[in-house]
Image (tube, rainbow, N blue to C red):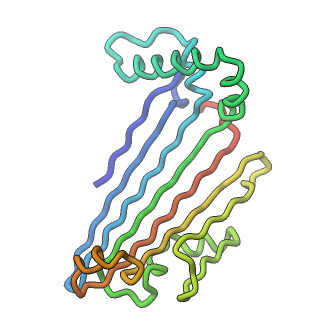
Amino acid sequence: MAFQAELPGPAAGSPLLQISVEIAEKTEADGARMRLRAHLRTSLGNAAITATAASPPRGSIARALARGIGRTLGNALQRPLARALAAPLLEHEINTWFEVQISTEPLDGGAAALLPAPERLARLGIVPRTDGSAPIMESWVGETGGGQPGFAQLSLLRLARDQLPPRLASLLGSRPFQLAAAVVNVIEPKRPPK
């Protein structure tokens, strides 16, 4: 299953909010695997522009909603403290990627075998530990490339059956269990509309 949604902004190609979600499930004789991926992109600066944009076309619920959000944000920005705190966010896009994989299959690498795109992580200099000494959660923060100021944050969570609370683990019976989740947040200067 997959879907995408967008809350339009003041001009074509500059939405206030975009979201895409994918869910996949695979069942095998020795277990099942499920993957959930989501990407959320928001630009609060587009919302501030929307507050002063022309009226949305009649019958456009999404544009009316976007204008309402923009008006609310515009009113909040009239307060000096809110304006000072929000100013950096208005000039940036915020992208969040979220991926969760759960497996009841016996996997040689355990929960580490479910980590998304290990080769891409390695190119970024991120090499999560895959041995038994790896913590349940690891996190990295760094600047983004491309010559523009910005930063990226990556957090990984790995859980195996023996790390679950005993009552929850007992519900699985004798089946194996692994879970790996990744959250990536990137904040970069806003791109000009297409």
The C terminus, quarter of image: top right
x, y (%) of residue 109? 46, 87
Residue depicted at x 40% and y 12%: 57
Quadrant in which residue 100 is drawn: bottom left
Question: Residue, x 77% and y 46% (percent of image)?
Answer: 148
Rendering coords of residue 161 (x, y %):
36, 81
Residue occupying the far right of the picture: 147
Q: Quadrant of residue 154?
A: bottom right
Question: Where's the N terminus, which quadrant?
Answer: bottom left
Is residue 188 depicted above or below 123 in this figure? Answer: above
Q: Is residue 189 left or right of residue 118?
A: right
Q: Quadrant of residue 171?
A: bottom left
Please tell me which residue is depicted at 43% across the width and 84% down the height of the picture: 110
Q: Is residue 179 above or below residue 191?
A: below
Give whichever of 172, 127 is nearer the camera.
Answer: 172
Q: x%, y% of residue 152?
A: 66, 55
73 sits left or right of 27 in the view: right
Q: Nearer the viewer, residue 13 or 30?
A: 30
* Residue located 58% across and 30% down the image: 44
Which residue is nearer to you in this view: 42 or 71? 71
Q: Nearer the viewer, residue 124 or 134?
A: 134
40 to 37, vertically: above or below: above
Residue 180 in percent (x, y) is at 44, 71
